[in-house]
Image (tube, coloured by chain):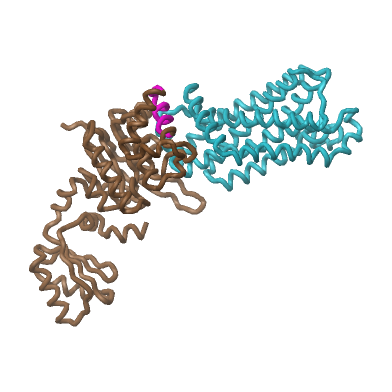
Amino acid sequence: MIAHTGLVFGRWMRASYRQPALIAFTLVQPAIWLLLFGQLFQGVVRLPGFGDSSYIAFLTPGIVMMTALMTSGWSGTSFVQDMERGVMDRMLASPVSRGGLMAGQLLSNATTTLIQTILVFAIGIAAGARYDGGIVGYLVTIVASMLVGTAFGSLSNAVALLTRQQEALIGISQFVSLPLTFMSSIMIDPTVAPHWVNVAARFNPVDWATIAARQSLAADPNWSSVWRHCLYLLAFTLIVGWLSTRAFRTYQRSV
Amino acid sequence: MATHAVEAVELVKTYPAGRKNPPLRALDGLTVSVGEGVVLGLLGPNGAGKSTTVKILTTLSRADSGTAVVAGYDVNRSPDQVRRSIGYVPQKSSSDPMATGLENLVLSGRIFGLSHQESLQRARELLERFGLREHGSRPVKTYSGGMQRKLDVALGLVHRPKVLFLDEPTTGLDPEARANLWNEVVRLSGQEGLTVLLTTHYLEEADRLAGQLAIVDHGRIVAEGTPEALKASLRGDSVHVELVDPDTDGTVRALLGQLPGIGEIVVEGNTLRARVDRGATAVPAVLGALEDKAIPVVAVTVSRPSLDDVYLQHTGRSFRVAEEAA
């Protein structure tokens, strides 16, 4: 499986760097979000609950997670393209490991997330965000964002295998990712959000990642909260990763 | 007893009802076997169950019931061994358009466990053999349809399979590219005892490529044999009468039916086809009878039996009509 993961990963990485327009888009989009939302909600820091931190510093880890979520929603389109051609069928009639077929694609998706995360941080810091936490904070944020990318990437791949349609995939992905973005602490501190949003956020993997990132970047992190949320996120990623690999069987039953 | 590279017995496959479609019984007890080194053509109109058969034999799909053994392995019990022994060229182009021809072939070789060096060598060999050598380093999306199809076949051969499955290898190709690919398949079949199972809805293709034919209709095999044997099993010749007006009330049919030496008659629109003992004597009789009744005729032709006649004989429909119905 590891060898096949590597081969499949190589295939998708090669395909991505051959599409410079797509790379530009995936990088420009988070930059716009960060700067746009940063301007739009600047006044929020004057609300109680934000302390003296700047909004851009608050927002940056949130936009990291939002970017990971939104970009990964598209992950399944590569599977749809493979199904529209005969590539998926040829692969599934070959000895390729199903786990490798899934993991290789997700790894290439996580690589995109990694680059986006670094870019969002760079822009955030250029716009004035400062973090008291050390290098560990950045590393936790990067790992958490890659987990978000992998979890929602594998959900997107599973939806692709089940629906086999680009339109259905995009529709479902939008339907899921917008509520997950807003029912979280990505843009707003939980203390100023309505109670029900905070309740919903407790079950939101994107919020787990955002909390872990913000905590670990703070001057005095609550490490038990960081690890707990990372652990939830990891468990969630593994479960959806396993389920989405099962979706190959459902696809094969329908061809 | 000859050994069989493929042996499928009583395959049944029903696709569940969708939102728009009723449940579809794609295979209805299909039994077929292919001897080692043989090129078998599964011939039938769209929707007859050809692709479904191939998908089951390549382990992509599973039959509801029935058994299938490919290259000595049961498709349900040992799918991995089957996958290692076969090459599968799906109906739709199966190359990655963003990768080059060479990259596609190398990746396929690596997946089948060849080393990078071996894969590279094999990939170059196949590009050469399929006349794609100069195009090996270009992305597949820049290839013509014929080139893509050749690459698809090459992808099915990288790991030197024992059995090659070609699902509609030339559908959508222009005549020149089709003839070109036919030559490649003919060359292949002579080599290394490779067994080929190909599906087609082109009578001409089946006649040209297949050493053995199996005619599929409504999920079952209705006739089997060499193309020559199938044609020879039809007695006599075939006469086609094209009328100006369709024979709606059956007058022409009744008229011709009375003539001596005329077998069964099938009417489709303006055309009547009749099996006759001897074409040379039947044509004047047919023309005379039609002239007596002043029935206008566009053309009368006589021919040796074709696969179309074989198809007609076994399914009660001509190939063209079956295709239109599908």
Magenta: main secondary structure equals: helix
Q: Residue at x 72, y 20 (%)?
A: A228
Quadrant of residue B257 within the rendered picture: bottom left
> Count of labels shown?
0
Q: Residue at x 67, y 36 (%)?
A: A27
Q: Does residue B77 appear in the picture of this structure?
A: no
Q: Residue at x 32, y 37 (%)?
A: B66
Left or right of B127 in this view: A147: right
Q: In which quadrant is the N terminus of chain B drawn?
A: top left
Residue B61: x %, y % from top left: 40, 38
Chain A, colour shown: cyan
Left or right of A241 in this view: B222: left
Quadrant of residue A18 within the rendered picture: top right
Left or right of B323 in this view: B229: left
Q: Which chain is the one coloured brown? A: B
Classify B95 as above or below A10.
Answer: below
Q: Magenta stretch?
A: B104-115
Q: Does residue A221 appear in the picture of this structure?
A: yes
Q: In which quadrant is the C terminus of chain B drawn?
A: bottom left
In this view, the residue in front, A94 or B45, is A94
In this view, the residue in front, A147 or B75, is A147
Residue A115: x %, y % from top left: 65, 29
Classify B291 as above or below B64.
Answer: below
Q: Within the magenta stretch, is there residue A169?
A: no
